[in-house]
Image (cartoon, rainbow, N blue to C red):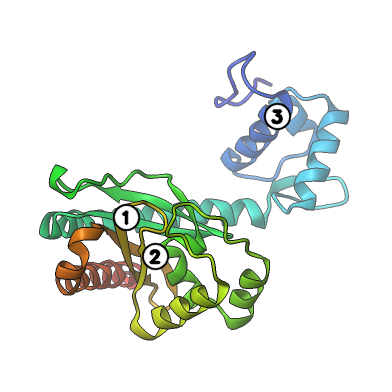
Amino acid sequence: MSRHSTNSPPGNGVKSAQRTLDVLEILAHSERALSHAELASRAAVPKSSLTQLLRTLQARDYVESMGPNGPYRLGASAVNLIRHGQDIQRLVASARPHMERLALGTRYSAGLNILRGDIVERILGVTADEASGYAMHEGVRAPLYASSSGKLFLAHMKSEDMTSYLDRVQLRPITSRSLKSASELRRQIRLAREEGVAYSRDEFTRGIVGASVPVVSAHGRMIASLGLAVPSAEFDAQKDTVLTHLRKAAHGISTQLSAARTAP
């Protein structure tokens, strides 16, 4: 039996990683659970090596065995990973037009961030014209304590999760304005919870104030933050306008996501 059509180019990458991805891709493309022998044949992996690989994948719930020795299918972790990727794609697609209007209306760059452990990651950036002086690049990661989006996620966490973070975090300086005091971070988190907006004043990027508001699910849970990068010298004069546009865009994204979820 020939290998699956998505086999890796020979000689590239780490063999164990290639084998892992091959097995997952084979199971993902199969309409039924596959036996150990079928997997070994399709992936061109020695049976003894496949046994060890399957044990690891089963321990992490990426592969599920239907019996003592197979047949095998994708496990809950793999399915959840696929669903999470699809959720991110829907979020980005829903947010993009609202963020483009936001950047056009304010002439400041906009970013959409999600929570990944103790950091936030920008999954979509829309850069305004050159007058804004700051570009939003996707893939940028920032500590929770240094970014407006991170502080906003902390404000929306369960009390015990926030306390656990504050107990373990080390406030390493990123700029000269980065927070040095846990008590000041707590104060800003409390304000973000009360006002529904969080700020980072030159704490992650010098000369830039970040302002972020939540994007929420149909159940009211914060799933992302929407932020603007405003030159520090302009922020105080533009604050009210910035927050009005920012909240309108976040509401539009949240509403669109809820409508898409309830659509037949």
**What residue did someone put label 1 on?**
111
In the picture, measured across the screen, residue 64 lies left or right of residue 222, that is right
Q: Nearer the viewer, mark 3 or mark 2?
A: 2
Q: Nearer the viewer, mark 2 or mark 1?
A: 2
Q: Position of residue 126 (x, y in %)?
A: 25, 49
Helix, strand or loop for disc 1: strand
The amino acid sitting under disc 2 is Ser
Q: Residues within 10 Å of mark 2 (few under 14, many from 20)?
A: many
Percent x, y of residue 105: 11, 59
The answer to whether residue 208 is left or right of residue 154 is left
Q: Furthest-bottom residue in view? A: 194
Counting labels gives 3
Which residue occupies the foreground of this view, 222 or 36? 222
Q: Looking at the picture, does residue 130 appear above or below residue 182?
A: above
Q: Mark 1 or mark 2, which is nearer the start of the sequence?
A: 1
Taking the spot 77% from the left edge, 25% from the top edge, the residue there is 45
Measured in 3D between alpha carbons, the distance from the residue under mark 1 to the one under mark 3, in whole angstroms, is 36 Å
Contact? badges 1 and 3 (CB < 8 Å): no
Q: Is residue 94 visible?
A: no
Q: Is residue 117 left or right of residue 15?
A: left
Residue at horizontal 80 percent and vertical 44 percent from the top = 56
Of 178 and 243, the residue lying toward us: 178
Q: Any mark on residue 19, and which?
A: 3
Viewer-side residue, 169 vs 20: 169
Mark 3 or mark 2, earlier in chain: 3
Which numbered circle lies on residue 220? none
The percent position of residue 128, horizontal first and vertical second, equals 18, 48
